[in-house]
Image (cartoon, rainbow, N blue to C red):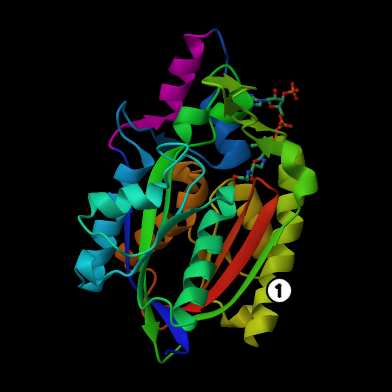
Amino acid sequence: MSLYSRILGTGSCLPPRRLTNADMVSLLAQRGIETNDEWIVERTGIRARHFVDEGVFSSDLGAQAARQALLAAGMAAEQIDLIIVATSTPDMVFPSTAAIVQHKLGIAGCPAFDVQAVCSGFVYALTVADAMIRAGNARKALVIGSEVFSRLLDFNDRTTCVLFGDGAGAVVLGASDTPGILASDLHADGQHVGILCVPGHVNGGQIMGDPVLKMDGQAVFKLAVGVLEQAAKAVLAKAGKTEADIDWLIPHQANIRIMAGTARKLKLPMDKVVVTVDQHGNTSAASIPLALDHAVRAGQIRPGQTLMLEGVGGGFTWGAVLLNF
Ligand code: UT7
């Protein structure tokens, strides 16, 4: 049994259709709704996002990100013995997107399941995979965040539809005698269900309730800034580290103002924060592994560095993972 787990490779996938803020202005204008590039950039930092085409699902993006992560790790899919997909936009009500990804990777037999913690999904999934590896239940896990949030958007609601995008990120997490994942800190508080949700559900062959994303942006914003600071400090304390040990902060990519606020509270300069929200928008559970992979491929994140991953979102859920890359 190994004492630790560590990331062996990263990958990501963005659907090719890219919409700039100018494209969103035109799209919304067709519905008689006004928005503008200045508002979106100033309030969120977002300049572009990617949307899938019809017939493309979370499992497609997730499988592609997984193939890249396997390649980066120098591994074949057959070596994987656990698949966890973090998603709030599964292909189907059931079975899990993870089972579909497994089949698309051409393998069978290993456990595969989804984790549903909305934008905190990836830090939840990484924590579960780490625990399973340390318990001796797996040795090589694929941990994937994959979303098609464009399918949940109400294009008549300018306060939400300009914020989100589609994409996937993945890591191969392997058993290791050296750390790896140093500590995790996860939380949920269900009293805030209503501030960020898709209230619809399937009943008797029909969709009951509204199946589009609803968000009280200001309530989410206020909660997010507070809990992200708490989770960051808690995970550092658990690992016996301080803010000065962090080489890179990889926060959930929802809003540059939330990310800058968190960095300020941790006394980290913005050049230690991985930022992809400008190009990807908010891709929910995919945002952290997507940002991680982009920073790795850009040569920013290097082996041996200490990374803090932080997620926050619907539930309300939040959490952080500290790791040696
Ligand atoms: O992924 C989970 C985590 N999610 C988040 O972290 C999201 C957190 N929340 C936020 O990022 C921000 O609250 C938003 C970006 C969603 C909104 O920013 P805000 O500064 O809180 O704006 P607001 O909701 O207070 O709206 C300010 C104004 C309103 O106009 P009035 O009422 O002041 O006249 C809105 O109608 O901005 C208007 N507005 C827009 N204007 C142009 C809202 N959306 C738009 C838009 N284009 N797309």
Residue at (51%, 20%) from the top-left corner? 205
Residue at (50%, 58%) from the top-left corner? 122
Q: Quadrant of residue 314?
A: top right
Q: How many marks?
A: 1
Please indicate, yes or no, whether residue 212 appears anywhere in the rendered image. Answer: no
Please tell me whether residue 195 is drawn above or below residue 263 in the rendered image.
Answer: above
Magenta stretch: residue 28 in it? Answer: yes
- Write down which quadrant ligand 1 falls in: top right
Q: How busy is the neighbourhood of tag 1: few (under 14 within 10 Å), some, or many (20 plus)?
A: some
In the picture, measured across the screen, residue 322 lies left or right of residue 214, that is left
| Quadrant of the image containing the N terminus | bottom left
Where is residue 245 shown, x and y percent of the image? Answer: 57, 82
Please indicate, yes or no, whether residue 22 appears anywhere in the rendered image. Answer: yes
Magenta stretch: residue 203 in it? Answer: no
Residue nearest the observer in this picture, 233 or 247 = 233
Q: Which residue is mark 1?
A: 233
Residue at (53%, 50%) from the top-left corner? 253
Q: Which residues are magenta?
A: 16-31
In the picture, measured across the screen, residue 108 lies left or right of residue 321, that is left
